[in-house]
Image (cartoon, rainbow, N blue to C red):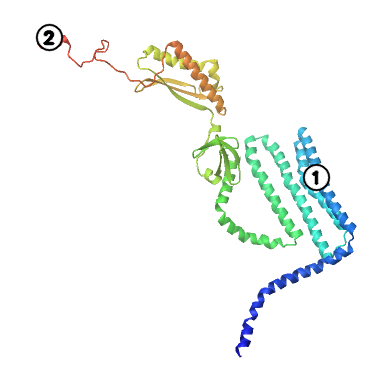
Amino acid sequence: MPILPVISKTAMPATTAPAVHHSLQSLLTHLANKIRLEDLTRQNHFYNWLILLGAVFLGVAAGRVAANTLRKIGEHLEARKWHFQALLVQGAAGPGNLFLFTLFFLAGISQLHLAPALRGILARTILLLVAVVFFWYLFNLVSTVELALKKFISRHDTALTEQLLPIVRKTLRIFITIIGALFILQDVFNRDIGSWLAGLGIAGLAVSLAAQDSLKNFFGSITLLFDRPYVVGHWVAYQGFSGTVEEIGFRSTRLRLFDGTLVTIPNSDIVNSSVQNYSLRPYIRRHLNITIPYDTPVEKTQQAVAIIKDILNTLEFRDHVHDPINPALFPPRVHFNDFNAASLNIQVYYYFRPAGDYWGYMAYNECFNLALMQAYTQAGIEFSFPTQTLYLAGDPKRKLPLFPDSDTQANDGT
């Protein structure tokens, strides 16, 4: 019998589980009492709710009509080459849609009889929507800043424009997003962001330690911006990848290969490695070896060399392989330079300009090859190919000392 009081005392902690449910229920009851749902339905007539529903419908309709109208006006301004005004109008399409809906919703909700608590919640909701509209439009206005900056920089350096603008655009949009989030937290939800910002100092240290690679890539992009080993549109080669630079971002560089593949390379790796920039070369050098048979006479060999020099000096071919400012700078080089195992070798170097016209360079090579084949055919000069020459012992033109002749045998008395 004495055990029963002890058992009842040990069973008391089991009542802590329903306490959570009881506290949540009391919280909901307290909130319902403050909002006064009964008064909300009792004090507002049917036509009040009908006005609210009509206001919401009109707000949605008016917002869509305004957005479509602003987009069409922007397209009209864009067609007239008024790019700045077009961005201002088109950027207001989405925010204008939400703003008109907010106005109609406010007009519909204001004619209802609401409890002070519910009226406060709706007031903060309206403030939240207005803040979203404002910062949304600022976010879209970054395009106008980008356009103005592009016009300013392009007067001096077009390549820098393509490299700098993506970084400026992303930085401004991130900044506006952060400012908008802090404003909403402080003015809409009454949160003290001062303590949050103070905590960011400690959190920033932890984040910086955890994001060392990202910081390296960011500073790598800054180095690329000022050092400029390449810009957007350049043809570069990096560790076996060869293609066109498509974008230089905060973290990486996007390289579009010639087969269409997109390669993303961290900027920190590029800064610490060598990159070949084909777009910055002053010319494209071609080196080829033209081979002719070993039995080509000396005169024909000299003619073969002269034919190549003459082709490169004709009006059709001269302009692309001679520097117009300094013709003596890297002129074509043609020499009979070597005796190969099965041919005579004529070495040819020429330097095609402009270096940026790669397909023009390929077309030039084709024309040169065809002209050389035609000239050699007319001169009776053959191109060599891998051959083997067989000498017969009985060939009277090339006697081989393999067997003694009959005169030698007679003198020896054999």
Q: Position of residue 196 (x, y in %)?
A: 67, 61
Q: Is residue 248 above or below residue 326?
A: below
Q: What is the CA distance from the residue labelled 1 to the residue labelled 2? A: 121 Å
Whether 272 is drawn above or below 322: the answer is: below
Three-letter code for the amino acid on which mark 1 is drawn = Arg
Q: Quadrant of the C terminus?
A: top left
Residue 322 appears in the picture as rendered: no
- Residue 246, given in percent of the width and then of the height, sits at 60, 38
Report if residue 254 is visible in the image. Answer: yes
Crowdedness near tag 2: few (<14), some (14–19) or many (≥20) residues, C-alpha within 10 Å? few
Q: Do the residues labelled 1 and 2 touch (CB within 8 Å)?
A: no
Q: How many numbered marks are there?
A: 2
Along the line of sight, which residue is nearer the eye, 329 or 336? 336
Q: Residue 64 carries which label?
A: 1
> Could you say where residue 76 lies in the image, as x and y percent from the top left?
79, 35
Q: Which of 50 and 392 is in front in this view?
A: 50
Residue 78 picture location, percent across and down: 76, 35
Taking the spot 64% from the left edge, 44% from the top edge, the residue there is 167
Left or right for 286, reference 179: left
Name the residue furthest front: 1
Looking at the image, residue 45 sits to the left or right of residue 197; the answer is right
Position of residue 386 relative to residue 24, above or below, is: above
Is residue 47 shown above or below 228? below
Q: Disc 2 on helix, strand or loop?
A: helix
The residue under label 2 is: 410
Q: Quadrant of the N terminus?
A: bottom right
Q: Residue at x 72, y 70 (%)?
A: 24
Identify the amino acid type marked 2.
Answer: Ala
